[in-house]
C-alpha cells in the first residue's frame, strides 16, 4: 500500500526538504567541542518516546503467536514495512503503576501508585538521558503533545511535569527561526556568568587539592571534573546561541486549526519531530498523544469523542469507531518510521540510530487496567526480535526496556525505576 | 574432612607465606617487607597449629585461604574477620580441637595490636573520615537556615545520594558529577530568588473563609452518596445536589459530612481559594466527626482527622484532630506559595483529605436509593467551614531580606530610580479566575510592585554584607582576602551594569556553591561546630555555636556538652530524629510497598503516617528521658494515637496526637521491634520474610552486618493461598550446610517476628485469600466484608545461635532485652557512623569500649550515648 499517495501533506515534499538540510555538518562540528572525539566517527544515538493515553485495543494489537514469525495483528499489519525493524512486546507492564488513566503520568517514569492521592512522580527516562547527553544539541530534549488538555511524558527529578510544546508553529520557530539579537545577547550573557562562576569554582577545588591527603585529593578531583564537565556543557549551549539555526525547505506550518483533526495534527507534529532529529536539533523527544476529549471526526467512521468510546463495553459499533481512530494513529506512526528510514546519515538510515518507543498506559481502557500494555519498539540499533511474549498473568517489567534504552544511548546505567535488569530477549545490534 | 590425608604443615614450611602475609598487613604502617614484626612471629605457630588445616590453599574452607591472603585492604578486612570470629568463639569450630585459652588470647591480642596499628596508620595518612559533600538533605537545610527561607524545597530536585554503611553521610558514597553541579547551582538560584525582597512595605494579610457548599466538587459526592448535608448530628433531609452543582437553593445544612477518603483516585481540592503570597498561613477548620450506621447519622466515639497538603508534591502540612459529634475550631500552620492559577494542574493546588474516613471505592455504595449514604457503617467527617489567613509575618522586614541585604532600605523601583531594573523574585502566576480572594497583583502578576534594595555606598555595603554572609555560609570566621575575593566578583558585575542587589547575589551564588559551603572538612573549633550542628540539626551552626568556636571555647568538654544539650532542645533537633531514624530503621522506605488491599483492607495512609510518628516520638522520648537501649526491644510504655491504639488493640486512646501511654501488663507494644513502621519496612506488602526481618534485627539492633547470599541463591516464592508457610519453605536453611552458616544466626529473629503481619498487627494465623466462602458470609472489618480468611498457624519459636531456645516473640524479646551491652555497642556503632560520616573501624574500637563503660551504669541511656559520641575524640577527628 502506498501510504504517501494518500497524504494531504506530501511525504515526498518533506523528504526532499529533509534531503537538502541533511548536508549540514552538524555532527562533525559539534563532537570535538564536546570532547567526544572518539564518537565523532559514528552518528549519535537518539530516542523518541511516544504514548497515546486512551489505550490501544488489545485484540487488534497483539499478535497471536510469538517469535520472529508472528502473524501480524490488524494494527501491526499497518507496520509491515518496518517488520524487520521492530519488536512487539506483550505481557509487560510497569510494576506498581496503577490508577487507570492516572498511569499516563508514569509511562516514562515508572513511578508507582499513580492512583494514590499522595502520588508523586519521579524523573522520566528522556530527562535522565538529557542530563547526560542533552548538551550535544540545541534542545537537550523536546517534549511535544498532540491533542487536548495538557499532558507531557517528561517529568523533572522532583516530579514536576515539563510543559510540552503543543503548537507546531511555535515548535518550527524554535527549531528553525532565528532569535532576536537582544534575546541572543541576553542568553549569552547569562551563560557566560555561569561559566565564569564555574571557572572560579574549579580553581578553588584545584587549590584545595594541594593541601589535602591523597584520598581527599581524589575526591576533589571528582568535584573539579564535575565542574569542568558542566562548563563544557554550558560552552556547548552557548555555542548554540550564536550558531545559525538549521535551514529547512519545509514550510512553516500553520497554527492548529482544528484540534479534533487528530490524524493531520499528528502527521504535522511527527514531521517536525523528524526534521528536528534530522537536523540534530535534539536527540531526545517525547510525544504524548492526548486524545481523550477529542472527537476525531475527520477520520471516516468516527463521530464520538474518544474517551467515551474507550468505555465500549464490547459494543461492536463503538469498538469499530475506536478501531478507526487507532488505525489512523498507527498509520501516522508508520509514516514517521518510513521517514526516519528514508533519512540517511553517513550512509545509515536515521531509524537505525533512533529508538522509537510507542505504547499506551492502559492494557485495556475499557477496564482501566494497567497491565498487559501494548508496546512496541522500532529502530535504534537493536536486534529486533519480532514478538516478545511474556506472562500475561505475571507481567514482565517494562522498566527493563528503559534500562536497555539507557544503555543503548551509551549511559552507564543498570536500573531505572522498578527495573530488575535489561529487557530479556532484546539485544543490542 | 580428614586432615590426615594431607601432608602435615610445619611452622617452618609455611613461614615464608606467613611472614609475607602479615608483613603485607603491616606494611601500611611503614614497615618494610624484610622485617617481619615480632607480633607476626608470635602468631605464626598459632595459626599454623589451629587454622591452616582448613584454611590453606588446598581446602580454602569458607573461601578463606590464609596462604594467599592479599596485600590490599580486602586483606585487612579479612584479618578483622579472622580476629572477630576467633574472638567470638566461632573458630575453631566446635568439632575441632580448641587451643588453650591463654594461647588463644595471646595470639588474638597480637593480631589485634597489628590491626590497630595498621588502621591507626591509615587514619593518620588518609584521615578517619576525609572531606565530604553535604548530602542533599543537609544542603537544603543549609540554604534554608543561611538564607532564612524556611519554606524552601529543593531536595527532590537534587539527585539522590549514595549510601554507605546504612547512611548517606559517608564521604565515599557522596559522589559528585556535572549533573549534581548543575542541580546544586539551580537549587542555590531558587534559594536566592526566594530570599529576594518582594515588597517595600509589609504586604496585606489575606483572610478567606468558605464552606464546602462553595466547592463545586462536593455536588459530585452528594450525587454519589459520599457526602450529606448536616445540622449537627442531624441530616439535612432536603439537601440536594445534581452534578455539577448543589441545587438546594437555601440549604439548611450547617456542615457537609463526607465519607470518602482521599486515597482512591479522588481528591478534595480547594478550588475556591488560592494563596496570594508566599509565606506561613494559618489554616483553620470548624468541624467534627460523626458516625454512620449504614442508614443514618449516629453519634461516634472516634475522632476525625483532616489533613491539608499539596500531596502530589509530597507536601503534607499535618493533621487536624476533629472531636466527635460536636464542632470545634482546629488549626495548623503551613508554608503556602502564591499561585495555583491557570498554568497549574489541579494536582498542584491545596487539597484536604478526611484521613479518618475509609476507602469507599472498595465496596459498593449507594445501590439502595433510599439510603443517602454508604450502605455499610462508616466513619464520617463534618466540615462547617475552612479559613485561611496569611501570609503571617511576625517580623518585618522578613528575615530572608536581612540575611541578604541587612538593614539596607527597600523601595519601589521606577525608571527614574537611576539604577538598572533588578531581577524580581519569581512569582508563579496568580489565582485561578474562579477562586478567591481578589488577587491584588493580577492573575499574570501584572500589578505586582517592582522593588529594589538601595545602597548609596555599594562597594562599602557589599563588603560589610559579605563579611557577615560568608561567615554564615562558610560556617567559620573568614579572612579579609576571602571577603575581597567575593567582593571582586560583586564589583565586576556592578561595573558591568548590574543592579547592586543582582551583583551582590552573584557573589552570594558563588559563595554558596564553593567548596567552603559544599564540603565538610578539616579539624579545629569551627569544624567541630559544623560537625555538631550537622549531627544534631542536619544543618549549619547558628550564631551562638559559631561564636563559641571563634572564641576557642567549644573544644572545652563542658561547653561542648552544654551546646549538644542546647541543640537537642531546639526544634531543629527533629531533623536529626527524622533523618537518623529514617536511615537507621529504614523509615525512609515506608512508601516502598503498598499493603495488599485484599489481605489488609484496614490499612490507610493515616495509619502509615501514625506509624512514622510513633517511631519518631518514641526515639524522641528515649532521648529526652535518657532511657536505656533495652527499650529498643522491650518497654513499659508506647507512643500512640487513636488510630494506632485501635490498630494495636490498646483501649482508651482518643484523638490523633501522639502521647506516652503505659502499655497493659504482658503487652509487647512500644519498642521499635514491634512498631508498625519497622514491621512494615521489613515486609513487602503481601508477605513477611523471616530472612529480611532477621537480617534487619541483626544489622540494626545487634550491629552485625549479614554477609550477602552467595550468587545464584534462589529466593522463595511467597504463597498467599495458605498452603505452605514461609517457615516451612525456609526449612532448607537448616539442612543445607552452605545456607546454615549464616541463616542459623539470622532467621531466628525473623521467625519470632512472624507473629506480626506486614502492617504490624499481631497474628496467630496467616491471612490467605481466595477460594473460601462467599463474600456475603464474611465478617466485616470497619464495615467492609473482608476478602481473606485465616489459614495456617504461626510458629514463632526458634533457637538462637548460642543454643538458647525461645517459644515465641515475647520469650525472644526477653532474651534480647537482657543483652544490654551488645545492643548498646550496635547502637553506638550506628550513631558514630551517622555522626562522623565513617563507620567504627578497628582502631576506633577501644574508644567505643570506653564510651560503653561510661554508659553502663545508666543501662546505656540513649541520650548518654549520644552525648558521649559528641564528646568523644572520634567525633572531632577529621
Image: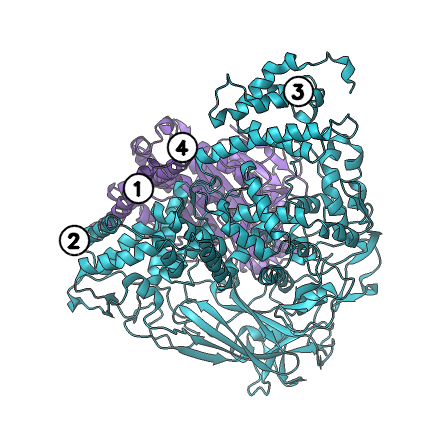
Chain colours: A purple, B cyan
Position above or below: B216 against B861: below
Q: Give me the chain letter of mark 1.
A: A
For disc 3, the marked residue is B45
Is there a contact, CB below 8 Å, between mark 2 and mark 4? no
Residue at horizontal 48 percent and vertical 27 percent from the top: B28
Badge nearest the viewer, 1 or 4: 4
Residue at horizontal 50 percent and vertical 51 percent from the top: B871
Q: Are marks 1 and 4 on the same chain?
A: yes
Badge nearest the viewer, 3 or 4: 3
For disc 2, the marked residue is B495
Q: Are marks 2 and 1 on the same chain?
A: no
> In this view of the protein, which residue sits in the foreground, A201 or A84?
A201
Question: In the structure shown, which secondary structural element does the residue marked by tag 1 occupy?
Answer: helix
Q: Are marks 2 and 4 on the same chain?
A: no
Label count reads 4
- How many residues crowd mark 3 within 10 Å: few (<14), some (14–19), many (20+)? some
Amino acid at each position: 500500500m502506498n501510504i504517501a499517495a494518500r497524504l494531504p501533506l506530501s511525504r515526498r515534499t518533506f523528504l526532499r526538504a529533509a534531503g537538502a538540510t541533511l548536508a549540514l555538518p552538524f555532527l562533525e562540528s559539534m563532537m570535538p567541542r564536546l570532547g567526544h572525539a572518539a564518537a565523532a566517527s559514528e552518528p549519535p544515538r537518539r530516542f523518541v518516546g511516544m504514548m497515546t493515553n486512551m489505550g490501544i485495543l488489545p485484540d487488534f494489537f497483539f499478535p497471536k503467536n510469538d517469535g520472529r514469525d508472528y502473524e501480524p495483528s490488524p494494527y501491526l499489519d499497518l507496520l509491515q514495512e518496518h517488520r524487520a525493524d521492530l519488536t512487539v512486546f506483550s505481557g509487560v507492564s510497569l510494576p506498581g503503576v496503577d490508577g487507570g488513566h492516572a498511569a499516563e503520568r508514569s509511562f516514562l517514569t515508572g513511578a508507582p501508585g499513580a492512583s494514590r492521592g499522595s502520588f508523586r512522580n519521579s524523573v522520566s527516562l528522556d530527562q535522565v538521558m538529557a542530563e547526560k547527553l542533552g548538551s550535544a544539541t540545541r534542545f537537550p530534549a523536546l517534549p511535544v503533545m498532540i491533542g487536548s488538555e495538557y499532558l507531557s511524558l517528561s517529568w523533572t527529578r522532583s516530579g514536576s511535569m515539563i510543559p510540552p510544546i503543543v503548537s507546531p508553529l511555535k515548535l518550527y520557530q524554535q527549531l528553525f527561526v532565528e532569535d532576536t539579537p537582544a534575546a541572543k545577547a541576553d542568553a549569552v550573557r547569562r551563560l557566560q556568568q555561569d561559566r565564569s562562576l564555574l571557572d572560579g569554582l574549579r580553581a578553588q577545588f584545584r587549590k584545595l587539592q594541594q593541601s589535602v591527603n591523597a584520598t581527599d585529593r581524589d575526591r576533589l578531583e571528582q568535584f573539579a571534573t564535575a565542574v569542568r564537565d558542566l562548563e563544557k556543557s554550558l560552552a556547548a549551549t552557548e555555542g548554540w546561541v550564536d550558531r545559525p539555526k538549521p535551514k529547512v525547505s519545509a514550510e512553516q506550518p500553520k497554527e492548529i486549526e482544528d484540534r479534533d483533526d487528530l490524524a493531520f495534527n499528528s502527521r504535522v507534529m511527527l514531521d517536525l519531530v523528524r526534521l528536528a532529529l534530522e537536523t540534530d536539533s535534539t536527540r531526545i523527544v517525547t510525544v504524548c498523544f492526548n486524545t481523550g476529549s477529542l472527537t476525531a471526526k475527520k477520520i471516516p467512521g468516527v463521530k464520538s469523542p474518544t474517551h467515551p468510546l474507550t468505555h465500549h463495553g464490547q459494543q461492536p459499533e463503538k469498538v469499530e469507531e475506536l478501531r478507526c481512530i487507532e488505525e489512523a494513529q498507527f498509520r501516522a506512526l508508520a509514516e514517521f518510521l518510513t521517514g526516519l528510514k528514508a533519512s540517511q546519515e553517513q550512509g545509515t538510515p536515521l531509524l537505525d540510530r533512533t529508538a522509537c518507543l510507542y505504547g499506551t498506559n492502559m492494557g485495556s481502557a475499557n477496564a482501566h487496567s494497567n497491565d498487559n500494555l501494548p508496546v512496541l519498539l522500532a529502530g535504534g540499533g537493536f536486534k529486533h526480535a519480532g514478538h516478545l511474549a511474556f506472562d500475561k498473568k505475571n507481567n514482565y517489567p517494562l522498566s527493563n526496556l528503559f534500562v536497555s534504552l539507557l544503555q543503548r544511548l551509551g549511559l552507564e546505567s543498570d536500573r531505572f525505576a522498578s527495573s530488575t535488569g535489561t529487557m530479556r530477549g532484546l539485544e543490542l545490534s | 574432612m580428614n586432615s590426615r590425608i594431607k601432608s602435615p604443615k610445619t611452622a617452618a614450611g609455611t613461614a615464608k607465606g606467613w611472614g609475607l602475609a602479615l608483613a603485607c598487613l603491616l606494611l601500611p604502617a611503614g614497615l618494610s617487607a624484610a622485617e617481619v614484626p615480632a607480633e607476626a612471629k608470635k602468631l605464626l605457630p598459632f595459626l599454623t597449629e589451629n587454622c591452616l588445616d582448613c584454611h590453606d590453599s588446598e581446602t580454602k574452607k569458607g573461601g578463606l585461604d590464609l596462604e594467599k591472603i592479599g596485600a590490599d585492604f580486602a586483606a585487612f578486612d579479612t584479618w578483622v574477620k579472622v580476629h572477630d570470629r576467633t574472638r567470638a568463639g566461632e573458630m575453631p569450630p566446635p568439632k575441632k580441637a580448641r587451643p588453650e585459652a591463654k594461647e588463644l588470647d595471646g595470639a588474638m591480642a597480637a593480631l589485634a595490636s597489628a590491626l590497630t596499628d595498621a588502621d591507626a596508620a591509615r587514619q593518620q595518612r588518609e584521615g578517619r573520615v576525609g572531606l565530604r559533600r553535604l548530602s542533599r538533605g543537609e544542603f537544603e537545610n543549609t540554604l534554608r537556615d543561611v538564607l532564612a527561607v524556611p519554606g524552601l524545597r529543593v531536595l527532590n530536585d537534587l539527585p539522590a545520594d549514595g549510601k554507605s554503611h546504612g547512611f548517606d553521610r559517608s564521604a565515599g558514597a557522596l559522589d559528585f558529577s556535572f549533573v549534581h553541579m548543575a542541580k546544586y547551582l539551580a537549587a542555590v538560584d531558587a534559594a536566592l530568588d526566594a530570599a529576594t525582597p518582594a515588597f517595600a512595605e509589609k504586604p496585606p494579610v489575606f483572610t478567606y473563609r468558605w464552606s464546602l457548599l462553595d466547592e463545586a466538587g462536593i455536588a459530585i459526592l452528594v450525587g454519589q452518596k459520599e457526602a450529606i448535608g448536616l445540622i449537627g448530628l442531624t441530616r439535612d433531609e432536603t439537601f440536594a445536589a445534581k452534578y455539577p452543582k448543589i441545587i438546594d437553593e437555601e440549604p439548611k445544612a450547617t456542615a457537609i459530612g463526607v465519607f470518602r477518603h482521599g486515597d482512591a483516585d479522588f481528591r478534595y481540592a480547594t478550588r475556591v481559594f488560592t494563596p496570594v503570597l508566599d509565606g506561613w498561613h494559618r489554616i483553620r477548620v470548624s468541624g467534627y466527626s460523626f458516625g454512620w450506621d449504614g442508614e443514618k447519622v449516629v453519634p461516634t466515639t472516634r475522632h476525625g482527622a483532616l489533613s491539608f497538603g499539596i500531596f502530589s508534591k509530597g507536601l503534607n502540612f499535618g493533621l487536624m484532630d476533629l472531636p466527635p459529634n460536636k464542632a470545634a475550631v482546629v488549626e495548623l500552620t503551613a508554608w503556602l506559595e502564591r499561585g495555583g492559577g491557570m498554568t497549574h494542574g489541579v494536582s498542584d493546588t491545596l487539597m484536604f483529605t478526611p484521613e479518618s474516613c475509609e476507602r469507599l471505592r472498595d465496596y459498593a455504595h449507594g445501590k439502595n436509593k433510599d439510603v443517602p449514604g454508604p450502605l455499610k457503617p462508616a466513619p464520617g467527617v463534618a466540615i462547617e467551614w475552612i479559613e485561611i489567613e496569611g501570609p503571617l509575618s511576625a517580623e518585618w522586614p522578613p528575615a530572608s531580606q536581612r540575611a541578604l541585604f541587612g538593614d539596607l532600605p527597600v523601595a519601589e523601583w521606577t525608571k527614574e530610580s537611576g539604577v538598572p531594573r533588578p531581577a524580581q523574585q519569581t512569582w508563579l502566576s496568580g489565582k485561578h479566575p474562579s477562586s478567591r480572594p481578589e488577587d491584588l497583583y493580577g492573575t499574570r502578576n501584572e500589578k505586582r510592585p517592582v522593588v529594589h534594595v538601595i545602597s548609596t555606598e555599594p562597594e562599602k555595603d557589599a563588603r560589610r554584607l559579605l563579611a557577615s554572609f560568608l561567615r554564615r555560609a562558610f560556617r567559620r570566621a573568614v579572612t579579609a582576602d576571602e571577603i575581597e575575593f567575593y567582593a571582586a566578583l560583586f564589583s565586576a558585575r556592578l561595573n558591568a551594569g548590574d543592579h547592586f542587589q543582582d551583583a551582590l547575589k552573584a557573589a552570594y551564588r558563588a559563595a554558596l556553591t564553593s567548596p567552603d559551603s559544599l564540603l565538610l572538612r578539616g579539624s579545629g573549633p569551627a569544624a567541630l561546630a559544623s560537625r555538631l550542628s550537622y549531627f544534631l540539626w542536619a544543618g549549619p551552626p547558628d550564631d551562638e555555636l559559631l561564636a563559641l568556636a571563634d572564641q576557642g571555647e567549644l573544644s572545652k568538654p563542658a561547653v561542648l556538652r552544654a551546646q549538644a544539650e542546647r541543640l537537642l532542645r531546639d526544634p531543629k533537633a527533629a531533623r536529626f530524629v527524622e533523618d537518623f531514624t529514617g536511615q537507621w530503621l529504614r523509615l525512609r522506605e515506608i512508601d516502598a510497598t503498598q499493603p495488599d488491599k485484599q489481605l489488609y483492607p484496614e490499612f490507610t495512609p493515616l495509619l502509615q503516617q501514625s506509624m512514622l510518628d510513633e517511631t519518631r516520638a518514641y526515639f524522641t522520648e528515649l532521648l529526652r528521658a535518657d532511657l536505656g537501649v533495652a527499650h529498643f526491644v522491650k518497654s513499659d510504655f508506647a507512643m500512640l494515637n487513636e488510630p494506632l491504639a485501635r490498630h494495636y488493640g490498646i483501649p482508651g486512646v482518643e484523638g490523633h496526637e501522639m502521647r506516652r501511654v503505659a502499655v497493659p501488663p504482658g503487652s509487647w507494644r512500644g519498642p521499635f521491634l514491634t512498631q508498625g513502621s519497622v514491621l512494615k519496612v521489613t515486609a513487602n506488602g503481601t508477605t513477611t520474610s523471616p530472612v529480611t526481618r532477621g537480617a534487619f534485627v541483626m544489622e540494626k539492633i545487634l550491629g552485625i552486618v549479614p554477609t550477602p547470599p552467595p550468587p545464584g541463591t534462589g529466593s522463595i516464592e511467597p504463597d498467599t493461598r495458605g498452603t505452605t508457610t514461609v517457615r516451612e519453605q525456609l526449612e532448607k536453611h537448616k539442612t543445607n550446610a552452605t545456607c546454615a552458616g549464616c541463616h542459623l544466626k539470622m532467621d531466628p529473629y525473623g521467625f519470632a517476628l512472624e507473629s506480626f503481619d506486614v502492617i504490624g498487627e499481631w497474628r496467630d494465623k496467616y491471612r490467605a485469600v481466595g477460594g473460601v466462602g462467599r463474600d456475603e458470609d464474611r465478617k466485616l472489618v470497619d464495615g467492609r466484608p473482608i476478602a481473606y480468611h485465616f489459614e495456617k498457624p504461626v510458629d514463632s519459636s526458634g533457637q538462637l545461635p548460642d543454643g538458647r531456645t525461645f517459644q515465641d516473640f515475647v520469650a525472644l524479646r526477653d532474651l534480647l532485652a537482657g543483652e544490654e551491652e551488645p545492643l548498646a555497642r550496635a547502637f553506638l556503632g550506628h550513631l558514630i557512623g551517622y555522626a562522623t560520616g565513617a563507620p567504627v573501624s578497628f582502631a576506633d574500637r577501644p574508644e567505643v569500649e570506653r564510651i560503653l563503660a561510661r554508659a553502663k551504669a545508666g543501662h546505656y541511656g540513649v541520650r548518654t550515648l549520644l552525648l558521649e559520641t559528641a564528646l568523644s575524640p572520634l567525633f572531632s577527628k577529621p
